[in-house]
């Protein structure tokens, strides 16, 4: 079965650079969530989209922005990168905001971002 | 606010031992509860879920029962294997004003020795 695809899997950037992370949800899924997991930490919710509109916002820095496109894939744009942005970034997808599937989300393998 | 608290790890067990990882929650509304597992270097995989009080989720020998009276969702397995070594996260989402975001506990590392 098709899963959530994230690219790139690994990314190394310098401080103050920009990065773009991409997420391709499971086919027919219309909801995308982004989470950030720091070393040894639990995943923290950043932002979500449903039907190409932002549906919720968590602890996402103003330096980050995201959007969902017409084909439902999503991109997380990160600017003025800081050392503290080094983390594993997960994308998850679900159908219909999880309303019909009891909020079950399917996670991608993550993008490991290292800021030097 | 909504939150999840897990027992601290690491939990170290011998193969075939009984496993319990405690999870308690605080939530408004009616939460759905989940256990996710993260193997080394990999993403999060849904292990099991329960969507209402007294529901029991089960998968791959793991079980957890949604206990509303004690606000708990403890993970259990009768006989662990070395391959179960991973980090386990308890998580919730809430309804009705729900956008589906997951709130995770801090994770519990399980190490199973042969």
Image (cartoon, helix red, strand yellow):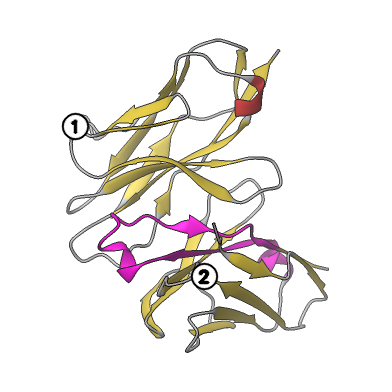
Question: Can you name the residue that lies furthest to the bottom here?
Answer: A70
Specify the quadrant that holds the N terminus of chain A.
bottom right
**Mark in front: 2 vs 1:** 2
Q: x%, y% of residue B54?
A: 19, 32
Circle 2 — which element? Answer: loop
Q: Relative to A2, is A19 above or below?
A: below
Residue A23 in the figure: left or right of residue B26:
right
Residue A86 on the magenta span: yes
Residue found at x 24% / y 35% = B71
- Between the C-alphas of marks 2 and 1, the distance is 32 Å
Q: Please state which of residues B42 and B28 is positioned toward the viewer in this rendering.
A: B42
Residue B76: percent from the left, percent from the top? 42, 22
What subunit carries mark 1?
Answer: B
Q: B76 above or below A63? A: above
Q: Is residue B5 left or right of residue A37?
A: left
For the residue pair B68 and B60, the one nearer the viewer reads as B60
**Is B104 left, or right, of A37 in this rendering?**
left
Q: Is residue B52 above or below residue A37?
A: above
Residue A79 counted in the magenta span: no
Element carrying mark 1: loop
Residue A25: give its label.
2
Of residues B93 and A73, the one nearer the viewer is A73
Q: Position of residue B43 (x, y in %)?
A: 61, 51
Q: Residue at x 32, y 68 (%)?
A: A97
Residue corresponding to mark 1: B54
Q: Chain of mark 2?
A: A
Residue at 25% from the left image edge and 61% from the top image edge: A100
Region in magenta:
A83-111
Q: Is residue B60 left or right of residue A86?
A: left
């Amino acid at each position: 079965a098709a899963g959530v695809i994230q690219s790139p899997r690994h990314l190394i950037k310098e401080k103050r650079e920009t990065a773009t992370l991409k997420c391709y949800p499971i086919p027919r899924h219309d909801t995308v969530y982004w989470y950030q997991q720091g070393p040894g930490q639990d995943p923290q919710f950043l932002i979500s989209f449903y039907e190409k509109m932002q549906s919720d916002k968590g602890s996402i820095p103003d330096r980050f922005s995201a959007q969902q496109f017409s084909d439902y894939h999503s991109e997380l744009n990160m600017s003025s990168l800081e050392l503290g942005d080094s983390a594993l970034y997960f994308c998850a997808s679900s159908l219909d905001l999880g309303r019909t599937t009891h909020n079950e989300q399917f996670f991608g393998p993550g993008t490991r971002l290292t800021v030097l | 606010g909504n939150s999840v608290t897990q027992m601290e790890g690491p939990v170290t067990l011998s193969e075939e031992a009984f496993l319990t990882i405690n999870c308690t929650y605080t939530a408004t509304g009616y939460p759905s509860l989940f256990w996710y597992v993260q193997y080394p270097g990999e993403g999060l995989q849904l292990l099991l879920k329960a969507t209402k009080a007294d529901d029991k989720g089960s998968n791959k020998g793991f079980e957890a029962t949604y206990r509303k009276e004690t606000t708990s969702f403890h993970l259990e397995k009768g006989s662990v294997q070395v391959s179960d070594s991973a980090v386990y996260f308890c998580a919730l989402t809430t309804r009705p004003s729900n956008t589906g975001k997951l709130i995770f506990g801090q994770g519990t590392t399980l190490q199973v020795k042969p």
